[in-house]
Amino acid sequence: MITNFLLDHSALVPAAILLLALVCAALGYLFAGRRRILWTLTGASLVPVFALTLVPTAHTIDEVVCTAQFFLPTLGSVELLANIALFLPPVYFAALASRRPLTMLAAGSALSAAIEALQAFVPAIGRACDTGDWLMNTVGALLATGMAWLVGRRAQSGSSTGAISS
């Protein structure tokens, strides 16, 4: 249902991603230094990651396949932008909670690679492995890392919460 809406209204996707980033930034700033809440937000934001990537579909794939392609997103490409947005919240909140943004960038990219490998080697779930998905998930993790660094610095200068330091 969400996918169909996004496909029908692809012009709204960049605005939706911007809104998602702003909501994440506000929550991160609001809860900077409150690691338990940030870890809870991380866990909650991983639910859609697993639901959209590993929940079996109605059809199965009969062979192990992984499409190897690399490309840059365009503003009209719903799937590419959705893959960026998918990894932005969990990596962002984890980077703030752990105070280790580069480690969370690596973890986000590794999680995406593991998901793509599962999609390739477990054809029964009916999901297609695509290196482009991994690349866009990693771009989302990279954006999340940058956001966490900026919000952490801002929160640190605004209070003594001890948010992320560089």
Image (cartoon, rainbow, N blue to C red):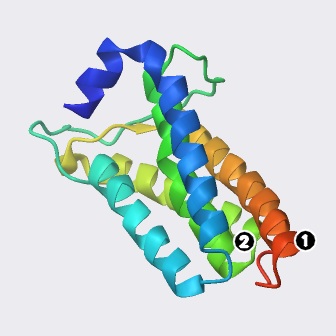
The amino acid type found where label 2 is placed reads Thr
Q: Helix, strand or loop at disc 2?
A: helix
Residue 33 coordinates in the image, percent (x, y): 68, 82
Q: Which mark is residue 103?
A: 2
Q: Is residue 116 toward the left or the right of residue 154 in the image?
A: left
Q: Is residue 107 visible?
A: no
Residue 62, quarter of picture: top left
Q: Earlier in the sequence, mark 1 or mark 2?
A: 2
Q: Nearer the viewer, mark 1 or mark 2?
A: 1
Q: CA distance from mark 1 to mark 2?
A: 13 Å
Q: Helix, strand or loop at disc 1?
A: loop
Q: As rendered, which of 69 and 93 lies closer to the eye? A: 93
Judging by the rendered image, the residue that carries numbered circle 1 is 166
| Quadrant showing the C terminus | bottom right
Residue 66 coordinates in the image, percent (x, y): 43, 37
* Residue at point 69%, 61% (across, down): 105
Q: As rendered, which of 53 and 119 lies closer to the eye? A: 53
Q: Is residue 42 visible?
A: yes
The amino acid type found where label 1 is placed reads Ser
